[in-house]
Amino acid sequence: MKFEGSICLVLLLVYASITLGTKDPEQGQSPYVFEDKHFITGMQTPHGRIRFLEKFTDRSKLLRGIENYRISTLEADPQTFTVPSHWDSDAVFFVTNGWGTISLIKHGRRESFNLRQGDIVRVEAGTTTYLINRDNKQKFVFAKILRPVNNPGQFEPFYVGGGDNPDSVYSALSNEILEAAFNTRRERLERVFGKQKQGVIIKASEEQIRALAPEEEEEEEEEEEGSREKLINIYKQHPIYSNQYGQLYHVDSSQYKKLQDLDVSVSLANITQGGMTTLYYNSKSTMIAIVVGGEGYFEMARPDLSRSSQELEDRPTGPSYKKVSSRLRRATVIVAPAGYPFILAASRNQNLQVLAFKVNAYKNQRVPLIGRRSVVSHLERQAKELAFGISAREVDEVFGKQQEEFFFKGPQQQHQGFSVE
Ligand SMILES: *[C@@H]1O[C@H](CO)[C@@H](O)[C@H](O)[C@H]1NC(C)=O
């Protein structure tokens, strides 16, 4: 009896998950949308974690163009130390929350500097890096884009510190070699490389944190003089677009030279509750966007690649498009390939912050399809008439109505298809 009951329950659950799963076929299944569950926890300790988004090509070949890029997040609890490591990937770090210190060892020198929300740091492959969360309340949180240098889409960390957990790179080598290289007996070596068992993000004492502070005086100067070199803060840039519905901040290699070789740019859209962006596309870049705060939604037009050759034969006149849509909440990642028009909108009761890494950033333009400077606004009268098959006046009436350029007032109604409350 009991057994039958549980079979029924299982069947019910299977049925429920099938029906729920088919309710909105585009939600969550689109290769362009990644949710919290698509992050893999790479390393976790009681004091923080490092997560990686699955490879862009795991679910679909459509994103082959960005196969060699990966997204990762790091969250470190208050007053913690992240054990020194180097990675076989180039990276751009963005501080989404909190503040603390980053130390980078390269070219035989150590550079330590304080980071706060909005800072962008280019970390070259192989640079030994460690972090300190100096705050006693807030988490220190990073979003990173990585470009592996050995294997496309695959990367590995190498811990110099550590011993038992994490393993230290030294521990892979034979005792004879280590004894000779360190010129030290094995017992002493075992003491050094066996003690650290607490993982990659560990608690530090107040005194340790204080002692690890970068020199304060230099810091002020760095902000003025050296900041172009070492780091840049996105919120200190003049917003490219700004009105009551939102602001768009942007940093590329013309402000921060170190982004040049990776050909990546970083932007941050802060969309006011009830606001949205224009419908626009990136001319050359693939945009990989991560929600770092608030809630909202996303819609994008994509070519309908599923049409059979029969359908193409029946209607050989041109392509057709399908909608990709998704709710946006913290940690949602969306990918907008070059040329694909999309909008981002905030929910009606929360501002939305979306961080975007763009690959193939050089010479990219944002091309608006609606608003004061839309593509259509540049067409001649006759081109408008021919393109839409109505009078140019009617075209202008519709396209001329929206006076804003980039951020608009969003829909009044509840967005259809899924709840955005
Ligand atoms: C983000 O938008 C909100 C609401 O308009 C505003 O209060 C806040 O100052 C903005 N933040 C930035 C960094 O622009």
Image: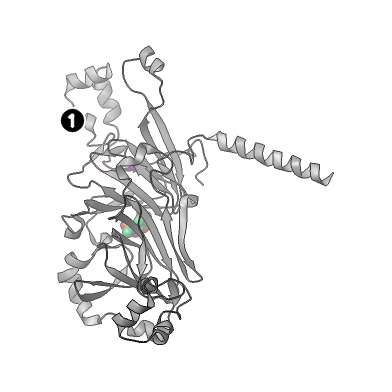
Return the x and y of residue 82 as percentages of the image width and height.
Answer: 39, 72
Residue 412, image quadrant:
top left
Q: Which residue is mark 1?
A: 378
Is residue 5 magenta-colored? no
Instruction: Return the residue nearer the eye: 4 or 332.
Output: 4
- Residue, far front: 176
The response on whether ligand 1 sits within 8 Å of label 1 is no
Q: Residues within 10 Å of mark 1 (few under 14, many from 20)?
A: few
- Magenta part of the protein: which range? 403-409
Residue at x-position 14% and y-position 70% = 225
Q: Is residue 15 left or right of residue 52?
A: right
Return the x and y of residue 319 as percentages of the image width and height.
Answer: 33, 22
Give amino acid for label 1.
His
- In terms of secondary structure, where does tag 1 sit? helix
Is 140 placed above or below 346 here? below
- Residue, far right: 1
Residue 80, image quadrant:
bottom left
Is residue 408 magenta-colored? yes
Q: Is residue 245 visible?
A: no
Return the x and y of residue 6 as percentages of the image width and height.
Answer: 76, 45
Residue at x-position 40% and y-position 63% = 74
Return the x and y of residue 49 as percentages of the image width and height.
Answer: 45, 65
